[in-house]
Every structure is written in C-alpha cells, then in structure tokens.
Amino acid sequence: DVKVTQSSRYLVKRTGEKVFLECVQDMDHENMFWYRQDPGLGLRLIYFSYDVKMKEKGDIPEGYSVSREKKERFSLILESASTNQTSMYLCASMGGQKGATEAFFGQGTRLTVV
Amino acid sequence: QKEVEQNSGPLSVPEGAIASLNCTYSDRGSQSFFWYRQYSGKSPELIMFIYSNGDKEDGRFTAQLNKASQYVSLLIRDSQPSDSATYLCAVNTETSYDKVIFGPGTSLSVIP
C-alpha cells in the first residue's frame, strides 16, 4: 500500500517559534509537495520539490522554507510562526507514468499558532 | 484565468438522487484527470481517474471527459449521506516536472 506519513496530526506552537513539519513517503517518488488548506480557499501550494536538494516556490512561499536531503523525506519549516499560519498542512507525493501522475496525501497536520 | 475551475457549491441533493459535479481546465495539453473526495478534517483520497474522452464507470461513480470542451465531470448515482464531502478535481499538466493542479473543490451535501 502507498504510504505518505506526516510527523504530527495536531500541533500547537507559540508565535515566533521555529516549526518543523516532516513528511515521509515510501513510494520512491521524485516529486513531493506541501500545501495548506483553509476554509473557502482550497489547496494552496507552498513549495514543491522534484528531486533531492531541489525546491521550487509555489503560490504562497512567504514565511516558509523547505528541505529535501533524502528522496523520501520533505520537510516544511516555518521560520518564525505567526497566527496567520494556523492552518491544515498537507503533504503530497506524486508519481506514476508520465502524463498520468497521481497525488497521494499524508493524513494532514492541523497547526495552531497561539 | 485559473487553471482548474469548479463550482464551489454547496451542492445539495436528496438521498437517492444523482449528484453532478463539474470541472473545467485551461491547459489543452492536459492528459489525465482525477477526482478526489475529502471529508471534513481529513486528507483528500483518490476516487476516480480518467485519461480518454468519454465515460468511465466505477460502481456508483461515473467520470466524463470531453477534451475538446476542456470539461470533466463526476456523476454520483443513488447518492448517499456518506457521499457528503468536498470533491476536488485535479489535472495532470505536462511540464518539465510532473505535477497535479487542483481545483478549489465543490462541497456536496446529500440530504436524507
């Protein structure tokens, strides 16, 4: 079975803290993505990576950074957490045949910044 | 113009009726199309994918694709309250890296 695992299901952090969200996939996929999802706004792409040590900004990268040191692991970093970063964070791993990529999601991390 | 568009809803249908969810996309080079279902507080799960023009059926679900009109739809027959969820349309784009573009989702409510 395909598996994408996020390190935490729920997280509460204080304003100004550095926050790490981890995502691990066991499908040997090259492409991994971090989204945040807020009511009424849908899935918004923060960063993605298509290879080890490679990263690309998505639509809303401000306040975030990422790390991809190993193929299976993609980390999202909130450099200095703020209350407007309270959200559901979803990691996705994408793979399959060329032109038939499927997205597999982790269980999500609901982050609350207080 | 957004790459993948959906009616946000909410769409309400009575139990046993057919629910029809619609999606349009802008990239003519798109090759594969997906429907994800997302229950409140959960992550999206893949329920249907379609590559060729026409219809694809899987149980109570039918995906319909019209590449000329850049339109993909999902029909849910005999709708059940357990079908109440947000349905995300997703499209695979051909670029130097494969990625899937998601629509904003349509909220479906099936009324018992």
Image: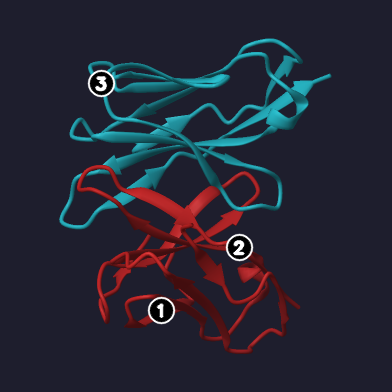
Chain colours: A red, B cyan
Out of A23 and B30, give the one closest to the viewer.
A23
- Label 3 Cα crowd, 10 Å radius (few <14 / some 14-19 / many 20+): some
Residue corresponding to mark 1: A66
Q: Estimate the x, y position of residue A84 in percent, counting from the top left.
A: 63, 68
Q: Quadrant where the C terminus of chain A lies?
A: bottom right
Which residue is tagged 2?
A: A108
User: Where, by quadrant of the figure, is residue B92 drawn?
Assistant: top left
Marks 1 and 3 in Cβ contact (< 8 Å): no
Name the chain under label 3.
Answer: B
Q: Nearer the viewer, mark 1 or mark 2?
A: 2
| Residue topped by disc 3 | B67
Callout 1 amino acid: Val
Quadrant in which residue B38 is drawn: top right
Vertical arrangement, residue B101 with respect to residue A73, above or below? above
Rendering coords of residue A106 (x, y %): 54, 62
Residue under the point 72% across and 11% down: B16
Q: CA distance from mark 1 to mark 2?
A: 17 Å
**Horizontal arrangement in the rendering, residue A92 relative to residue A55 (left or right):** right
